[in-house]
Image: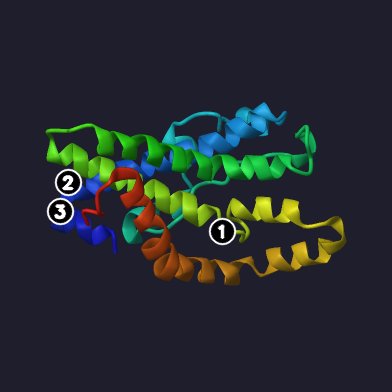
């Protein structure tokens, strides 16, 4: 559990907490900004067009994140009927969050790769930040409701498969369990770890 790190190494716990706050906040802000740019002001009117973490964190989900290392943020609301493109608009809004995580991971990771930082603590924090954003981006792209990838997947389905969409949403609690297993046994060792090494040019330091 993540909370054990608080007692064994408070400084690293603080680094992880800050990286999570930044990663989640920019992720949710990106959803809100995408929806607003595509014509829907719902998120803006509810105060979600901000990187302030207080606007995006669900009380229970946030508590679980800082205790066990897994949780959720407050979903950004949007009205698909307000979007200029009602077929692909939801997919674009969904993609915005994970893409922001990958962009942050790429930007900070390239700093680690090409610049020499004399402070080992800063290097470690940047490493955590890159890794957590790769985890967030990869996990949220999985095509399982309510994850962001489901909006992309559902946009690709033809209207004739409307019944399949309903059954997918009804099965989402069960599918989330498999999404977590996927990240543990495939996502982490075969996707995020190689991406981390590719971007930073260094192995995971933890």
As drawn, 74 above or below 42: below
Residue 61's x, y, as percent?
45, 54
Callout 2: helix, strand or loop?
helix
Q: Nearer the viewer, residue 55 or 83?
A: 83
Percent position of residue 71, x then y: 44, 56
Q: Name the residue rendered at 24%, 49% in the picture.
A: 202
Mark 1 crowdedness (10 Å alpha carbons): few <14, some 14-19, many ≥20: many
Question: Which is nearer the N-term, disc 1 or disc 3?
Answer: 3
Q: Examine the rendered structure and indicate whether residue 50 appears above or below residue 157.
A: above
Task: Tell me the mark number nearer the camera, choosing from 1 and 3.
Answer: 1
| Quadrant in which the C terminus appears | bottom left
Alpha carbons under labels 2 and 1: distance apart: 32 Å
Residue 74 got which mark? none
The residue that label 3 is drawn on is 9
Q: Please, is residue 101 above or below residue 43 in the view?
A: below
Residue under the image location 13 percent in, 40 percent down: 120
Residue positioned 28% across, 47% down in the render: 128
> Do the residues under discs 2 and 3 have CB atoms within 8 angstroms?
yes
Residue 40 in the image, given as x and y percentages of width and height: 71, 31
Q: Nearer the viewer, mark 2 or mark 1?
A: 1
Is residue 74 visible in this depiction of the protein?
yes
Callout 1: SS: loop
Q: Compute the Cα span from label 2 to label 3.
A: 6 Å
Q: Residues within 10 Å of mark 3 (few under 14, many from 20)?
A: few
Residue 43 lies in what quarter of the image? top right
At 83% from the left and 63% from the top, the residue drawn is: 161
Secondary structure beneath disc 3?
loop
Q: Do the residues under discs 1 and 3 have CB atoms within 8 angstroms?
A: no
Instruction: Residue under label 2, please give it.
Output: 11
2 or 1: tag closer to the N-terminus: 2
- Which residue in the protein does label 1 denote? 142
Number of numbered discs overlaid on the protein picture: 3
């Amino acid at each position: 559990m993540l909370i054990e790190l608080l007692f064994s190494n408070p400084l690293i716990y603080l680094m992880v907490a800050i990286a999570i706050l930044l990663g989640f906040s920019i992720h949710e802000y990106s959803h809100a900004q995408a929806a607003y740019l595509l014509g829907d002001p719902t998120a803006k009117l509810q105060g979600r067009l901000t990187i302030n973490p207080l606007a995006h964190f669900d009380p229970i989900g946030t508590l679980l994140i800082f205790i066990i290392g897994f949780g959720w943020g407050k979903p950004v609301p949007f009205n698909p009927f307000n979007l200029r493109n009602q077929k692909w608009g939801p997919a674009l809004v969904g993609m915005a969050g994970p893409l922001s995580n990958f962009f942050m991971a790429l930007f900070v990771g390239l700093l680690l790769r090409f610049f020499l930082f004399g402070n080992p603590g800063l290097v470690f924090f940047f490493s955590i930040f890159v890794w957590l954003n790769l985890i967030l981006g990869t996990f949220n792209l999985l095509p399982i409701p309510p994850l962001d990838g489901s909006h992309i997947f559902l946009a690709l389905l033809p209207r004739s498969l409307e019944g399949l969409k309903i059954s997918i949403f009804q099965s989402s609690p069960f599918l989330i369990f498999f999404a977590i297993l996927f990240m543990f046994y495939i996502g982490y060792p075969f996707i995020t770890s190689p991406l981390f090494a590719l971007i930073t040019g260094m192995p995971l330091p933890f």
